[in-house]
């Protein structure tokens, strides 16, 4: 998979996308992540990428020209399965979306800033709009990092144990059950006996029961 990210703050993405699982995924060749500085495509002398809103109002708007030129260049080199714009008014990111996007060959992610991008960029280029929650961040970079992490970890070969992602919260619309490790007795709190039994079938049944119970208690909306 190849992921291209368009941003005016490339350094903000360097750390989360070049450490831990994301780093190993790139080193193993499972994913290529390319970060593009939108300012490099600005035709303005000062490399500005924003201007005042038509109609007045507080806040600046990202210009069409540098974004369009960057996307045009990348599209001339490859076809993208989705061109994604990170925005508070996009569809809320769900595990099912991550699962679908993880099967893509090429993804392009546009990070907004200021009051957002000129609507015409969204109308002409963007095929999918994503939000990571009902709140506003200073820009789309952190949201893009969340999206990339949630997608890349699902690519076969990225996780050492490929079954791990299949038992994560929100797969099958369930939260993950409680997990335990050594010691089996910590400050008087003991690991459930079933997990020490060695009976794989009963352990799986217990975990499924706990997942259903936890989901009903904490996220009943998942089963509506």
Image: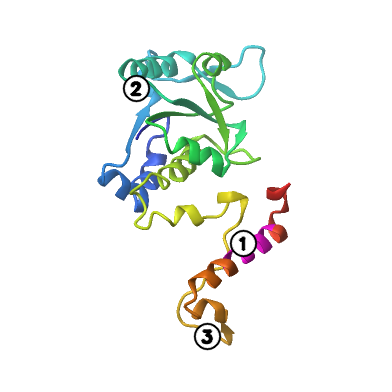
The residue to which callout 3 is attached is: 185
Q: Nearer the viewer, mark 1 or mark 2?
A: 1
What residue do we see at 60% from left, 25% from top? 59
Circles 2 and 3: CB distance less than 8 Å? no
The residue to which callout 2 is attached is: 40
* Residue 17 magenta: no
Which sits earlier in the primary sequence, circle 1 or circle 2? Answer: 2
Of helix, strand and loop, which one carries label 2?
helix
Instruction: Let me know if residue 109 appears in the view.
Output: yes
Q: Nearer the viewer, residue 32 or 179?
A: 179
**The quadrant where residue 69 appears:** top left
In the rendered view, tell whether residue 45 sits above or below residue 36: above
Marks 2/3: CA–CA distance: 58 Å
In the rendered view, tell whether residue 14 sits above or below residue 81: below
Q: Is residue 88 left or right of residue 162?
A: right
What residue do we see at 66% from left, 15% from top? 56
* Magenta stretch, residue numbers: 207-215
What residue do we see at 56% from left, 15% from top? 123
Which sits earlier in the primary sequence, circle 3 or circle 1? Answer: 3
* Residue 214 magenta: yes
10 Å crowding of disc 2: few (<14), some (14-19), many (20+): some
Percent coordinates x, y for residue 7 in the rendering = 43, 30
Q: Nearer the viewer, mark 3 or mark 1?
A: 1
Instruction: Let me know if residue 46 appears in the view.
Output: no
The residue to which callout 1 is attached is: 211
Which sits earlier in the primary sequence, circle 2 or circle 3? Answer: 2
């Amino acid at each position: 998979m190849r992921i291209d990210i368009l941003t005016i703050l490339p350094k903000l993405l360097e750390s989360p996308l070049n450490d831990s699982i994301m780093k190993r995924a790139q080193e193993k060749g499972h994913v290529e992540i390319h970060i593009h500085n939108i300012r490099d495509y600005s035709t303005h002398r000062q490399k500005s990428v924003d201007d005042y809103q038509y109609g007045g109002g507080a806040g600046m708007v990202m210009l069409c020209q540098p974004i369009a030129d960057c996307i045009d260049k990348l599209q001339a080199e490859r076809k993208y399965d989705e061109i994604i714009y990170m925005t508070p008014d996009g569809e809320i990111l769900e595990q099912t979306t991550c699962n679908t996007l993880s099967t893509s060959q090429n993804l392009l992610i546009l990070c907004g800033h200021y009051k957002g991008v000129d609507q015409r960029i969204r109308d002409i280029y963007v095929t999918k709009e994503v939000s990571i929650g009902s709140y506003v961040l200073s820009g789309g970079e952190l949201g893009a990092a969340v999206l990339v992490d949630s997608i890349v970890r699902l690519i076969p070969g990225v996780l050492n144990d490929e079954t791990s992602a299949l038992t994560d919260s929100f797969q099958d619309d369930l939260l993950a059950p409680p997990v335990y490790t050594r010691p089996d007795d910590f400050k008087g709190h003991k690991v459930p006996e079933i997990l020490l039994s060695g009976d794989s079938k009963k352990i799986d049944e217990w975990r499924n029961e706990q997942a259903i119970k936890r989901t009903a208690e904490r996220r009943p909306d998942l089963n509506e």
